[in-house]
Image (spheres, rainbow, N blue to C red):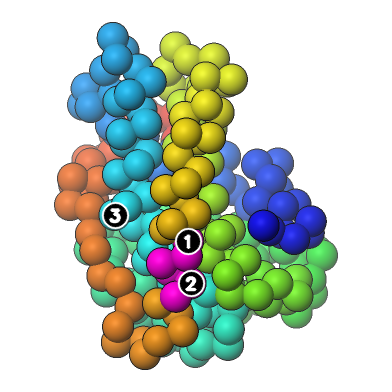
Amino acid sequence: MLAPHALLLADGRFPGGGHAHSGGLEAAVADGSIDPARLFPTLQAFVAGRLAATGAIDAWLAASSCSGGDEAELDAEADARCPSPALRVASRRLGRGLRRAAARSFPVVAGGPGQHHPVVVGVVARAAGLGPDDAAQLAVHHVLAGAVSAAVRLLPIDAADAMAVAIGLTALAAEVAAEGGAAARGPLCDGPAWSAPLVELRAEAHARWEVRLFAS
């Protein structure tokens, strides 16, 4: 279970900028992957897919960063696992936002380059006195909560029903976080390297939209 101060970092009201990103949900809604006639199961399938495809990578990066891994090297590993330029930009924006907000509570994280979000999650977790497994859980929580929170603004769904989607995926989220945390205890070359090509293709198309509600 996350420590109390970790729960504050994971709270949706923490001003790291996550509210401006849908985790790819906006593009998925636009292309019909989220079916209004089967809203709950298709939304749950989308979020579960994101967890399975990229959640363990984010958890691994965050846990490795929290345990003192070289941040520049981990950032390069994140780049190598993110072919989409649009998603790279979004991840770095989220990283900068998290670092800037967290620096008010933990000055040690102030400054630094514009690193990928999960790498910064690890930096912030370490500054908060948390462990690598906590960092892994925070990174997975971001993947899970980002899309679910955005769903309320994009879909005809009640906030309680959207949260039910997240709660229904807690076992998968815990499994993914544990997998990422375990990978962080091994050699860097053994880190997970799955991808989500459809999410990446959607992100590139979404970045070219003239009007959109979310940055990604």
Tell me the number on the disc at residue 101: none
**Label 3 neighbour load within 10 Å: few <14, some 14-19, many 20+:** some
> In the rendered structure, which amino acid carries the disc numbered 3?
Ala
Residue 198: horizontal and vertical position, in percent?
18, 45
Could you tell me what secondary structure mostly forms the magenta stretch? Answer: helix
Q: Kindly tell me whether residue 143 is visible in this rendering.
A: no
Marks 1,2: beta carbons within 8 A: yes
Q: CA distance from mark 1 to mark 2?
A: 6 Å
SS at circle 2: helix
Q: Nearer the viewer, mark 1 or mark 3?
A: 1
The answer to which of 64 and 12 lies nearer the viewer is: 64
Residue 190: horizontal and vertical position, in percent?
30, 83
Image quarter (top left, top right, bottom left or bottom right) of the C terminus: top left
Tell me the number on the disc at residue 177: 1
Q: CA distance from mark 3 to mark 2?
A: 16 Å
Badge 2 is on which residue? Answer: 181
Q: Nearer the viewer, mark 3 or mark 2?
A: 2
Q: Is residue 52 above or below residue 206?
A: below
> In the rendered structure, which amino acid carries the disc numbered 1?
Ala
SS at circle 1: helix
Q: Which residues are magenta?
A: 177-182
Q: Residue at x 49, y 89 (%)?
A: 70
SS at circle 3: helix
